[in-house]
Image (cartoon, rainbow, N blue to C red):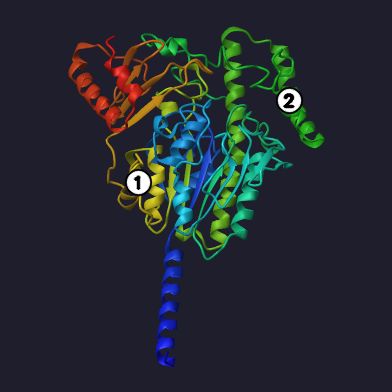
């Protein structure tokens, strides 16, 4: 071969290599910060007045805040499975926390990795089976611990890490980012434990909200009229929330949270006991009963919960600062969301599970300077089944036809665009913790139709425009007959489209 021909081939190969490198560099990085049980109502950008989330509020100002983001199944493990697969719970096999997720199935990180991304999951995983499709993972076993948690590495080794879980997860995330191959785009999921029950704040944040007397939600003393499932639940602050386990009172017979305290170092324990011993001394002196006791529990719950979110927000700030410092912000999609919402005393409850707004609705903030105008607010409806196709399209990767979600990219390009006019929901765990009945349903812009089935069979219908707190079940009222019929048709169609055979079977049953 002549020298000129060899030179031409070499130049051609170099050009191909340069183009490939340029394409990789132009593809956006993806950072997903996934918290656990973070209520929309506690975030400043969504209207909270208590200053707990300055860094999340900053993220919202620099990106887009979504007011109508929903989950398809409001419970920890299943929600993560939906995010990973882009498929509903009955398809991905993780219906409730008692199931074992098959991590060998098709998940979006596998496609990103195959296309040249470096992929990682760090922190809370909560899917039993070890992660697959990642270049790196280091996860909390099960729910994980707030203080000095164990973590399981890719080699299967379990190691204790000294410190507070939220700090540790951030430190490990930034360490991985420092060591990554900088010629490749990256995708990392930062899986936070906070602010999951039992709401254990970092010692530096103890008592930060003790000066606030949180107002009771208007429906705190809900009597659950004409709502059978609400009457049957076991998730009330009054009856279910434990003085010992949840609120750290060691004098309570059920002081099972003491095992978490034993995990602490002497220094951590000293600060912890110094704070909660004073709280308990005051409680024992006052000896509240009746409504005074219920409302004392509510205040303690709110103060611990909000205090736990302080470290969460602080560490989100560290991640954002890292991206800025390393000139990564411009080409990085940052997604903040939670695995579901949470009740902060609405209906007298804590926890999640129900299809009602407080648990079905989840926070969602997305920043991507190349595409999203700062300060964007979207009222378009999306679902967490839409995350996987969104990440794949953003990365220029083909979306598998089996994925059931819809890419949010049209919304990121145009805040007025729409990808869905309804959200589908199905909760499977009964009998189970908190005694929430099995149910599925449809949420449109104005209405919510819910079918409870199996153990008990009945319908609920809410007009969210007139009744945003979902206090009046209007199913069966004459003036809503045509609306109900239309919603039932839409729900049936969704069940068929989503291949939800259990729901289809329930719809076929006469009440």
Q: Position of residue 303 (x, y in %)?
A: 60, 28
Q: Residue 408 carries which label?
A: 1
Give the quadrant of residue 148. Answer: top right
Reading the chain from its start, which is encountered first: label 2 or label 1? 2
Q: Determine whether, in the image, residue 27 is placed left or right of residue 415.
A: right
Seen from the viewer's position, the closer of residues 36 and 205 is 36
Which residue bears the numbered disc 2? 259
Q: Give the residue at x 33% y 22%.
A: 503
Q: Give the residue at x 56% y 36%.
A: 129
Q: Give the residue at x 71% y 12%.
A: 253
> Gap between marks 2 and 1, in whole Å?
43 Å
Mark 1 lies on a secondary structure that is: loop
Query: From the viewer's perspective, is residue 96 above or below residue 187?
Result: above
Q: Determine whether, in the image, residue 150 is placed left or right of residue 229.
A: right
Q: Position of residue 346 (x, y in %)?
A: 46, 21
Q: Residue 18 carries which label?
A: none
Give the quadrant of residue 308. Answer: top right
Query: From the viewer's perspective, is residue 147 above or below residue 467?
Result: below
Q: Determine whether, in the image, residue 208 is placed left or right of residue 432.
A: right
Neighbours of disc 1 within 10 Å: few (<14), some (14-19), many (20+): many
Q: Position of residue 502 (x, y in %)?
A: 35, 22
Q: Can residue 275 be seen? A: no
Neighbours of disc 2 within 10 Å: few (<14), some (14-19), many (20+): few
Q: Determine whether, in the image, residue 177 is placed left or right of residue 336.
A: right
Seen from the viewer's position, the closer of residues 87 and 102 is 102
């Amino acid at each position: 071969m002549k020298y000129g021909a060899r030179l031409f081939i070499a130049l051609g190969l170099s050009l191909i290599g340069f183009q490939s490198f340029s394409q990789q560099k132009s593809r956006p990085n993806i950072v997903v910060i996934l918290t656990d049980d973070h209520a929309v109502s506690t975030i400043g950008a969504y209207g909270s007045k208590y200053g707990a989330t300055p860094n999340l509020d900053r993220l919202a100002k620099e990106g887009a805040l979504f007011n109508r983001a929903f989950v398809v199944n409001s419970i920890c493990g299943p929600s993560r499975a939906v995010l990973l697969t882009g498929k509903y719970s009955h398809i991905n096999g993780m219906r409730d926390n008692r199931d074992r997720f098959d991590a060998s199935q098709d998940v979006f990180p596998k496609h990103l990795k195959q296309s040249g991304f470096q992929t990682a999951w760090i922190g809370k995983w909560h899917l039993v089976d070890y992660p697959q499709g990642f270049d790196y993972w280091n996860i909390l076993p099960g729910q994980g611990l707030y203080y000095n948690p164990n973590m399981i590495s890719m080699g299967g080794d379990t190691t204790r890490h000294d410190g507070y879980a939220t700090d540790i997860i951030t430190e490990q995330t930034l360490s991985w980012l420092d060591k990554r191959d900088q010629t490749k785009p990256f995708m990392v999921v930062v899986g936070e434990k906070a602010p999951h029950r039992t709401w254990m704040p970092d010692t530096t944040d103890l008592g930060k909200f003790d000066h606030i007397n949180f107002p009771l939600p208007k429906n705190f003393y809900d009597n659950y009229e004409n709502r059978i499932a609400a009457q049957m639940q076991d998730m009330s602050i009054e009856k279910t929330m434990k003085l010992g386990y949840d609120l750290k009172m060691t004098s309570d017979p059920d002081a099972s949270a003491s095992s978490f305290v034993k995990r602490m170092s002497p220094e951590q324990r000293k600060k912890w006991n110094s704070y909660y011993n004073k709280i308990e001394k005051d409680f024992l002196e006052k000896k509240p009963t009746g409504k005074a006791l219920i409302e004392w529990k509510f205040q303690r719950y709110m103060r611990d919960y909000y205090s736990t979110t302080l470290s969460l927000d602080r560490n989100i700030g560290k991640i954002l600062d890292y991206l800025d410092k390393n000139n990564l912000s411009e080409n990085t999609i940052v997604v903040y969301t939670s695995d579901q919402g949470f009740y902060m005393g609405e209906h007298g409850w804590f926890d999640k599970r129900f299809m009602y707004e407080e648990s079905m609705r989840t926070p969602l903030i997305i920043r991507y300077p190349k595409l999203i105008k700062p300060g964007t607010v979207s009222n378009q409806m999306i679902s967490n089944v839409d995350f996987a196709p969104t990440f794949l399209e953003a990365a220029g990767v083909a979306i598998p036809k089996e994925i059931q979600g819809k890419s949010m990219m049209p919304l990121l390009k145009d805040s007025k665009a729409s990808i869905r006019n309804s959200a589908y929901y199905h909760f499977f765990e009964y009998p189970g913790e908190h005694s929430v009945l099995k149910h599925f349903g449809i949420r449109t812009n104005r209405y919510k139709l819910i079918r409870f089935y199996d153990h008990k069979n009945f319908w609920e219908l809410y007009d969210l425009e007139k009744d945003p707190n979902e206090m009046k079940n209007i199913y069966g009222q004459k003036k809503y007959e045509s609306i109900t019929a239309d919603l039932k048709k839409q729900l049936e169609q969704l069940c068929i489209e989503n291949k939800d055979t259990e729901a289809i079977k329930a719809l076929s049953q006469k009440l």
